[in-house]
Amino acid sequence: MELFHGPTLSFKDLAMGVLVNIVDFLLQRRKEWQTLIVVTTGDTGPAAAHASAGKGSLECWVLYPSGMISEEQARQMTTIRADNVHAVGVSHCPNGGDDLDLLVAELSADRDFSQRLRLSSVNSINLCRVLAQTIHFFYGYCRVAESLGERIVISVPSGGFGNMFGGCLARMMGLPVEFFICATNSNATLHRIFSTGEFSKADLRQTLSSAIDIVIPYNFWRYLYLASGRDHAKIRSWMNEFQKQGGFELDVSTTEEIQRGFWSASISDSDTLTTIQSVYESTGGYLLDPHAAVSVAAAQKLSARIPPDTKVVSFATAHPAKFPKVIRRALGISGELPPAARHHSIDSARQAPERCLAFDLGELPLAIRQEMESVATRRKADRE
């Protein structure tokens, strides 16, 4: 199921467009403005930047770990010609986007700073993003089911669990999904949770499916809250244990509940490349991006469990043109990419001038505050 036909070639475009336009509408009606701060591991940032570009009610700051997303994804942010969009590349992030998430949490917790800059976020921590993503699941079901009530399987490449949580909500609304496949790369936090009941943080591994290089799937806490019977005290205790010790074991009843209707798999880079190549060759040229390949590979890995004649939908979350190095490696080519690996917007961005702030992670906490304060001061003066 191709979810990458939006302006930034990512599944994030639908929900981000809905959310940012709702925020802009409400701010205009109230004659107010707001600062959005976004952390991205590849797709969220371009979608947020594009949706925010030119909106007078918004200042949008997109932070990404330098060298840990593709150049094509970075250029989708750094080449936007809009004064209210600010791309920030951050070097030396050992935990990738998770390091930047911690900074955003600190900025948001600083009440004086947050109120002065009217700080908000459009990462999937904002529930509107997750709610809008339930549409993917209903649409996919309606495209393949031959009769209402037919049970299907949906495989989703998963990192932060935001898209997958949208699927959980869709099923709670009545969507007849027999099983979800939570497809992870070698950063297998979610796979460990579903297979063993262990919620633990490991060191980040840089993989070919970089957008799901996430070791703390913060949206999983939402699913865990529902699966635990909405037990606030239990969630608080687990969060404290995770923060202090880096992990915890779920109790037996909660482990059984989270596994109900869920399978999971961890897919290596080698399997990702093999899947891209085999699908390309067996279909006469259909090209998966590395995240769609994780989704397809996970479904293939678990195929013995899937009942006969059950339809399987694998989410393709990004256009392969965003990952030319991976495609060349998978197909064993060094020259011109096949047409399926090209897109005019990516080609244009390669030629466009860039505008980007660059900081080291160590200097970022002070530097980003200064930059954001400067822009907020200028905005206030302009309005007066």
Image (cartoon, rainbow, N blue to C red):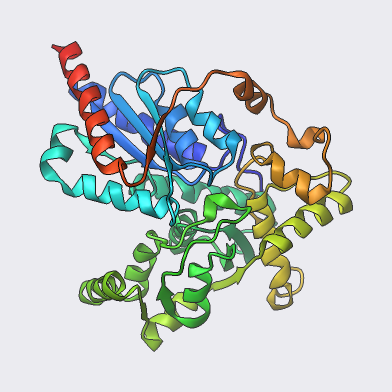
Note whether 314 is above or below 3 in the view shown: below
* Residue 180 percent coordinates (x, y): 57, 66
Horizontal arrangement in the rendering, residue 320 relative to residue 73 (left or right) = right
Q: Residue at x 34, y 32 (%)?
A: 22
List the single residue furthest toward the left: 112
**Relative to 258, is 56 on the left or the right?**
left
Query: In the picture, residue 173 is in which quadrant?
Result: bottom left
Whether residue 92 is visible, yes or no, is yes
* Image location (x, y in percent) of residue 10: 57, 40
Disc tally is 0
Residue 115, placed above or below residue 204: above
| Quadrant into which the C terminus falls | top left
Q: Residue at x 35, y 63 (%)?
A: 222
Q: Nearer the viewer, residue 69 or 227?
A: 69
* 140 left or right of 190 in image: right
* Image position, residue 126 (x, y; %): 33, 47
Q: Nearer the viewer, residue 339 or 74?
A: 74
Q: Is residue 260 visible?
A: no
Q: Quadrant of residue 241?
A: bottom left
41 is higher (above) or lower (below) than 226? above
Q: Is residue 263 above or below residue 204?
A: below
Q: Position of residue 213 (x, y in %)?
A: 52, 56
Instruction: Tell me which residue sits at (27%, 35%) in the image.
Output: 367
Left or right: 380 in relation to 320: left
